[in-house]
Amino acid sequence: MKKNFKEVVFSGVQPTGNLHLGNYLGAIKNFVELQKKMECIYCVVDLHAITIFQEPKNLKKHILETVAGFIACGLDVKKSIIFNQSSVSGHAELAWIFNCVSRIGWMNRMTQFKEKAGSDKEKASVGLYVYPNLMAADILLYKATHVPVGDDQKQHLELSRDIAQKFNNDYKSENFFPIPEPLIHKGFSRVMSLRDGSKKMSKSEESDYSRINLTDSSDDIVKKIKKAKTDSLSIPDSIKDLEGRPEALNLLNIYSSLKNSKIEKTLEQMAGKDFSKFKENLSEILIDIICPIGKKIKDLKKDENYLQKTLEDGSSKASKIATKNLKEIKKIVGFPLY
């Protein structure tokens, strides 16, 4: 008989510094909506961050910046658990157990490792290779039933589901772990670079004009949108006519996401206009939404004690859940409990 699990959402964001529009529209905006409906656990995944070397001073700074970004965007510490991954040792402990449950063949199929490791994967860290097992541990340590995912994380969530199922079967513990379901952000399209509509918006891209940072000033936003790559054609009245026009599609998708509207409605309103006028409208809505967030981030960063306290409180709450679940897991595996 299938067990009924309490609905729990888990998701994590890497502390890479400078949260940008892609982070906001792709994840954090959705986190804020989910906390109104379900029990939510949001983690700054600093263990994942060090799969590629991070300067220690910068890592700590980026962890606090990410927490500031969470709160500034609307996450409520009274409604959601917010903490950093390394503060709860259960993540690493369960990841090792899952290293022994997961199969090498499963790891070899992970496309993101191939992309991040590049052409010389022999020099990539082992951590980067087994990163998906740690992600499964993050989710299942809290018996999360739902995970907000973008296109680039779907494969990792599938692996988490496979690991949960294999653990349940191997240890004759039917339905111990839930099989987590993806939460697809409806009506959302991935935010792409303002300089190249075929690439995801990213902090790692060299040009700052490729992205809107959550701390950008109104002048920065106007300049970046004005210089954003488009084409010489006007805005069409159908999505089909945007085929082969990735930069135009990206800007229209960004506008639609900010307006909580479908792109079809945007095209209906904007059809026939040139992009110079549309860019003015896009800049206005970006300034209205992003600049207040940026101001809050800057104010919160001045109060490091508050951010540290937020992490401590969140860690305490997360640890209670993790400790209870890990104790059950160890008992199932056969480890002596003292």
Image (spheres, grey):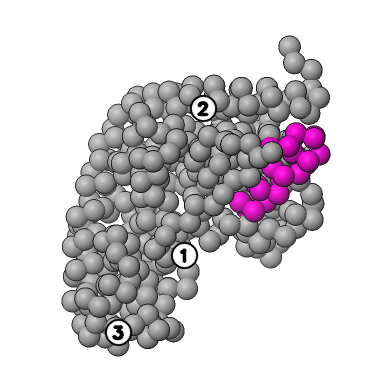
The relative height of residue 76 versus residue 160 in the rendered view (above or below) is above
Can residue 288 be seen here? yes
Q: Which residue is mark 3?
A: 236
Where is the N terminus found, in terms of image quarters? top right
Q: Marks 2 and 3: in contact by CB < 8 Å?
A: no
Q: Is residue 179 magenta?
A: no
Where is the C terminus found, in terms of image quarters? top right
Q: Amino acid at mark 3?
A: Pro
Picture disc at residue 200: 1
Residue nearest the observer in this picture, 297 or 124: 297
Q: Position of residue 280 (x, y in %)?
A: 18, 70
> Which residue occupies the extreme front position in the image?
1
* Label 2 to label 1: alpha-carbon separation: 32 Å
Callout 2: helix, strand or loop? helix
**Magenta stretch: dominant secondary structure:** helix
Q: Which residue is mark 2?
A: 318
| N-terminal-most mark, 3 or 2 | 3
Residue range highlighted in magenta:
156-175
- Tell whether 296 sits left or right of 246: left
| N-terminal-most mark, 2 or 1 | 1
